[in-house]
């Protein structure tokens, strides 16, 4: 789901998309940093590392390839802190592997972190429901919707930069629909696991910054 800077710098509209992405990413990251409970920085770092690793493992699908993103899981566990976590992971990917490029860092952060925050707001509470079935459904929805919203933003950014990218964007979205199902299953499985071993991690995004999560 990376947008490469070379795809956006070819037009004035594309440069505008880069600028808007940078501004939105900066704003989201600022909010995320203000909301982080600094006792949870290791958790943010761990999820940032997980995002960094899984995004680099590509599986060929026809003429394209797909990879796990886990932005739904990151959003459920971190809330607004998903912005700085994803920004750091994407920065390292751009520096070490050239993924997307530094100029596209802002827009790539927005296409992956904004959906993460959205599904976190929608489903964090539901993953703590007394019913295991309801929590699993919420986890699946968070994972699947995180990918689907990201695909919509990715396609919108590409099409806004250049109308000729419309067909390519549509093909890429269709090729990644199956990934949404996989992400949903992975996120649901992670939620089920955390409910058993570390349920307090599912509560953290709902607490005010600075409020320690009880282990009880």
Image: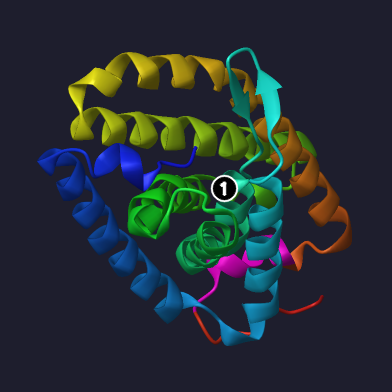
Q: Residue at x 35, y 36 (%)?
A: 153
The magenta segment is: 201-208
- With respect to residue 23, does 30 lie above or below? below
Residue 192 x/y as whole percent: 81, 45
Image side of residue 146 versus residue 203, left or right: left
Main SS category, magenta section: helix
Residue 74 position, x and y percent, is 60, 55
Question: Badge 1 is on which residue?
Answer: 71
137 within the magenta span? no
Which picture quadrant has residue 3?
top left
Residue at position x 20%, y 32% from top? 160
Image-based side of 104 in relation to 127, left or right? left
Q: Nearer the viewer, residue 31 or 164?
A: 164
Q: From this view, report whether residue 62 is shown above or below residue 189.
A: above
Vertical relation: 117 (above or below) 8: below
Q: Quadrant of the C terminus?
A: bottom right
């Amino acid at each position: 789901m990376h947008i490469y800077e070379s795809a956006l710098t070819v037009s004035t509209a594309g440069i505008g998309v880069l600028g808007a992405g940078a501004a939105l990413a900066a704003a989201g990251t600022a909010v995320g940093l203000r909301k982080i409970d600094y006792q949870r920085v290791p958790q943010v770092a761990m999820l940032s590392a997980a995002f960094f690793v899984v995004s680099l493992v590509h599986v060929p699908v026809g003429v394209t390839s797909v990879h796990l993103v886990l932005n739904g899981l990151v959003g459920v566990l971190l809330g607004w802190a998903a912005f700085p976590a994803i920004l750091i992971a994407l920065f390292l990917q751009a520096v070490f592997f050239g993924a997307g490029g530094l100029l596209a860092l802002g827009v790539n952060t927005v296409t992956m972190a904004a959906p993460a925050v959205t599904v976190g707001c929608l489903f964090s509470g539901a993953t703590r429901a007394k019913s295991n079935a309801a929590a699993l459904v919420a986890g699946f929805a968070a994972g699947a919707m995180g990918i689907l919203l990201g695909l919509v933003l990715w396609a919108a950014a590409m099409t806004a930069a250049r109308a000729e990218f419309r067909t390519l964007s549509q093909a890429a979205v269709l090729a990644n629909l199956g990934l949404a199902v996989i992400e949903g299953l992975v996120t649901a499985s992670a939620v089920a696991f955390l409910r058993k071993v570390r349920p307090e991690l599912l509560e953290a995004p709902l607490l005010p910054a600075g409020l320690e999560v009880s282990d009880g």
